[in-house]
Amino acid sequence: MRNVVLVLSLAVVACGGGNRPSTTPTAAVALTPGQIDSLWTNAEGLLANRKWTNAIIAFERLQLELPTRDPRRPAARFMIAEARLGEGSNLQAVREFRRVADDFASDSLAPEALKRAADAYSRLWRRAELDPTYGMQAMATYQEVQSRFPGTPAASASGVRIRELEDMFALKTYKAAQFYIRYKALDSAILYLKDLVATYPQAAIVPEALERLVETYQTLGYVEEVSEACAYFRRTHPQAPNLEATCPSADAGAKDGG
């Protein structure tokens, strides 16, 4: 009997004792335009003051509060991406910038958002000797900016960044060639140097690469190759500071190959 009373007591407790008032969920109250404007001003201030986490929270809330057709929705997403970039969450920033460029492709922020996604990738490849995967993703994304949004300031800025990345890729190739030169694997070094010159002809390291290429040919006794490399060197970089030392004037009459 005692056990029966205990079971009944537990059942009453489980049912709330029969005395607890029932509760029903209340509908969310939409903010007024003035309240939304106030939230926006506060979120912008947080971002300007580098309060990255708080800025993300504030703009995420705005994403929920802004009406569907509010023109500030792309900007709110863009600001979240900037805050992610500011806190160093580069891959999260890429995703957020991509959402702006892809979900709001006709918005004026779309070209800059895609460029900023490329910037975020680029930040992950700071040194030429490291794995270039993120550098390649940055390059592809900058090229996508130029393809999707030609004639925009973002496309123009992407062109500058592409050239900077090409310098880094060329430097990476040059370092590989130096490695093979150091260990006397000269034919392998030649392959890297020729690939560098052919693939990144405008890179800043090219004159130095040509110097190493000529010196390597000379070491191996490749007379014809020296002549061709010097002719190419003179034709493409006539103002290079070490041109004369690498390819003395006596070689100027060499055939114009490359």
Image (cartoon, rainbow, N blue to C red):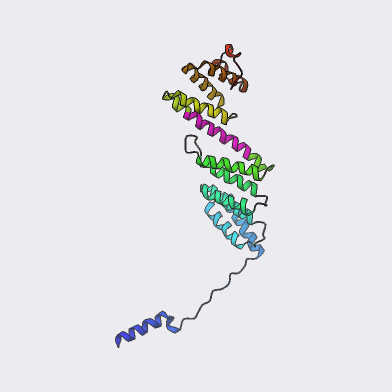
Q: Position of residue 140 (x, y in %)?
A: 58, 42
Which secondary structure is most common in the magenta stretch?
A: helix
Find residue 201 and report its image quarter. top right
Q: Position of residue 154 (x, y in %)?
A: 65, 43
Q: Residue at x 61, y 48 (%)?
A: 113
Q: Nearer the viewer, residue 75 or 155?
A: 155
Instruction: Tell which of 64 and 221 is nearer to you.
Output: 221
Q: Which residues are magenta?
A: 158-176
Report the residue at 56% width, 32% height from top.
167
* Residue 173 among magenta residues: yes
Image: 252 above or below 179: above
Instruction: Residue at the far bottom: name it.
Output: 1
* Vertical arrangement, residue 146 with respect to residue 38, above or below: above
Taking the magenta stretch, the answer to whether it contains residue 221 is no
Whether residue 49 is visible to the viewer of this picture, yes or no, is no
In what quadrant of the picture does the N terminus appear? Answer: bottom left
- Residue 73 in sight in this render: yes
The residue at 60%/42% (across/down) is 142
Q: Is residue 184 left or right of residue 164?
A: left
Specify the farthest residue to the top: 250
The location of residue 14, given as percent across then percent down, is 41, 79
